[in-house]
Amino acid sequence: MEFSEWTKEKRKLNNFEELKEDILNNFKEQGLEDEKIVVMLSGGKDSSTALALAKDLGLNVHLCVHFVHKWSWELAKNEAERIAKKFNVPILFYDITDELRRRAIGAKGSSICRICKNIMKDKVVDIAREHGAKIIMTGDTALEKISGPIMDYLREKYGKVVYKKMELTPVPKKYKMMFFRPLIRLAHEDVLKLKEYYGIDIKRVHEVGDKIGFWREGCPMQYCDEDTIITEELLDELYELNKKITDIAREHGFRASIKLPSKKIIVVPKKKEYIDMIKKTLNIQ
């Protein structure tokens, strides 16, 4: 399987066989071939494809962890459970609602995803240590900002970016844990190729997501207006309204989300008939 020109040029990775060889070499060089891996499994296409690849390589995938909270999608939980079962890996559901309340209530809307991701990362490190695992796997792709810190680490270690070392690093260093990101060099289109190769079919919520053009879903909290102050009432309303409109969007084959408190409606594709449908559903003029 050949990869895209972007992946070949920007990440020095030509094809699937090369990726598998690089990953296995990284594990062998660091003496980690048999170490337990704990997977952050969101139930989306990226983490599911990463899991499929890790199992294909014969790595010691010990446990999947899926984080839930009061405002997370039930569909994502169900998909994570289904994917873990498909690849015969135990799954742990960990509720972070209380920690979210403590850290997010009173903060600005622009910080909600960062807060949530930090909570999940802190907790998965604790879980990995409890299980005697030295490696945490994520579905991060070339789209993620973590690529920058990984490259900085490689420059520091090797004097240059050795791209074939990107998949297995101790970044972020503060956790003193190895992070395995098998998709970190792949462009979006190459992740889709692997997804199809492994026969992974993910049911979608049909929200807009955080990156227009790539359909990456998360949860309704991300639709807080950036300058608003987060309250539990706001999060409750975000869940309620986005649940209503994603049900409609799923039924009619488009994607929709609403931001609060501005009530800004976003649809993909951007069609007036879809916006009108959402306004009617929510009784918005």
Image (cartoon, rainbow, N blue to C red):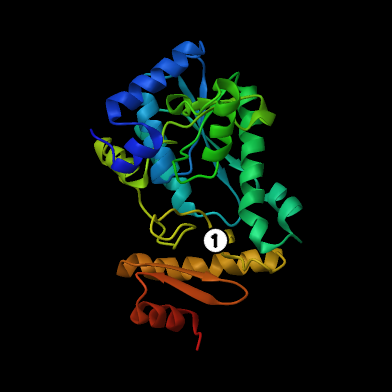
Residue 75 lies, with reference to residue 122, above or below; the image says below
SS for dot 1: helix
Residue 282, image x, y percentages: 49, 80
Residue 128 lies, with reference to residue 92, above or below; the image says above
Q: Nearer the viewer, residue 219 or 171?
A: 171
Residue 22, image x, y percentages: 38, 21
Quarter where residue 171 is shown: top right
Question: What residue lies at 43% left-to-right and 61% top-to-bottom?
Answer: 212
Question: What residue lies at 61% left-to-right and 45% top-to-bottom?
Answer: 117
Q: Residue furthest bottom?
A: 285
Question: What residue lies at 60% left-to-right and 77% top-to-bottom?
Answer: 262
Quarter of the figure with the N terminus: top left
Q: Nearer the viewer, residue 231 or 32?
A: 32
Residue 203, image x, y percentages: 35, 52
Relative to 188, 27 lies left or right: right
The number of discs equals: 1
Residue 225 lies, with reference to residue 61, above or below; the image says below
Question: What residue lies at 65% left-to-right and 60% top-to-bottom?
Answer: 110
Q: Residue furthest left?
A: 1
Q: Residue furthest front?
A: 159
Neighbourhood count class around disc 1 (C-alpha, 10 Å): few under 14, some 14–19, many 20 upward: many
Residue 241, image x, y percentages: 53, 71
Q: Which residue is mark 1?
A: 220
Relative to 224, 193 lies left or right: left
Q: Looking at the image, can residue 217 be seen?
A: yes
Q: Looking at the image, can residue 87 be seen?
A: no
Q: Which amino acid is tagged 1?
A: Pro
Residue 112 lies, with reference to residue 47, above or below; the image says below
